[in-house]
Image: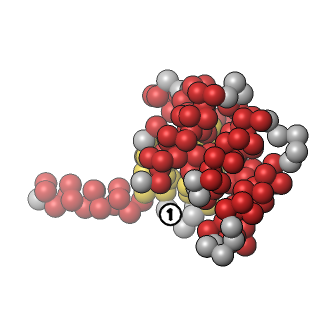
């Protein structure tokens, strides 16, 4: 439900704004600020008035903020939807990625790949999808590799355990 509402706000914001990139970057910064537990608690608290919540967000973006952005924050505040800012930012970022045909993905593995190997993997994904994909590496205890690009719905998993299980199944079937 939250994502659906965020999409509507993001669509409305995109239709009235000429510089969606800068608005998305402001919303990304606000999202980071909202992820701080104290700020999130203040935004979701029934004790703090909607006006104070709106003023808090407006003071965070500064007095030099775009009029469209200020009005957008005020509308969110009036409708008690300031806590949707991270979801709206996520939708706007996804729209910008789709528009530019550039996506971000995550490579999870137990060891870090070299720059050359990472570049080859990105090139292979680019050939497969037709989109430029930038991978960020994360270390996990997973023995193997997992590549995911959420905005494209891609998840590829190569694990030693899975290969081992498939090999055992194949041997069992051949006997």
Please determine whether, in this image, residue 19 is positioned above or below residue 168: above
- Which residue is drawn at the image coordinates 28% and 56% (left, top)? 167
Please determine whether, in this image, residue 159 is positioned above or below residue 18: below
Quarter of the picture containing the N terminus is bottom left
- Which residue is drawn at the image coordinates 65% and 54% (left, top)? 77
Q: Nearer the viewer, residue 124 or 37?
A: 37
Q: In x, y percent, where is residue 6?
A: 52, 46
Q: In x, y percent, where is residue 25?
A: 73, 41
Q: In x, y percent, where is residue 116?
A: 67, 37
Seen as rendered, the residue at the extreme bottom is: 47
- Which residue is drawn at the image coordinates 72% and 27% (left, top)? 19
Using the rendered view, name the quadrant where residue 53 is placed: bottom right
- SS at mark 1? loop
Quarter of the picture containing the C terminus is bottom left
For label 1, the residue is 142
Mark 1: few/some/many CA within 10 Å (<14, 14-19, 20+) = some
Q: Nearer the viewer, residue 89 or 57?
A: 57
Please determine whether, in this image, residue 45 is positioned above or below residue 57: below
Q: In x, y percent, where is residue 121?
A: 56, 37
- Which residue is drawn at the image coordinates 13% and 56% (left, top)? 173
């Amino acid at each position: 439900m939250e994502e659906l509402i965020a999409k509507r706000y993001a669509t409305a914001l995109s239709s009235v704004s000429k510089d969606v990139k800068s608005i998305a970057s402001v919303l990304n910064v606000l999202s980071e600020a909202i992820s701080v537990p104290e700020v999130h608690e203040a935004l979701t608290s029934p004790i703090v008035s909607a006006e104070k919540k709106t003023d808090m967000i407006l003071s965070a973006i500064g007095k030099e903020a775009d009029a469209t952005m200020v009005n957008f924050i005020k509308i969110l505040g009036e409708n008690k939807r300031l806590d949707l800012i991270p979801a709206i930012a996520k939708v706007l970022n996804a729209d910008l990625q789709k528009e530019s045909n550039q996506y971000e993905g995550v490579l999870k593995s137990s060891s870090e790949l070299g720059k050359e190997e990472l570049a080859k993997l990105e090139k292979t994904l680019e050939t497969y999808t037709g989109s430029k994909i930038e991978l960020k590496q994360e270390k996990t205890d997973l023995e193997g590799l997992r590549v995911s690009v959420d905005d494209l719905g891609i998840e590829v998993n190569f694990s030693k355990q899975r290969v081992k299980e498939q090999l055992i199944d194949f041997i069992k079937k051949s006997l």
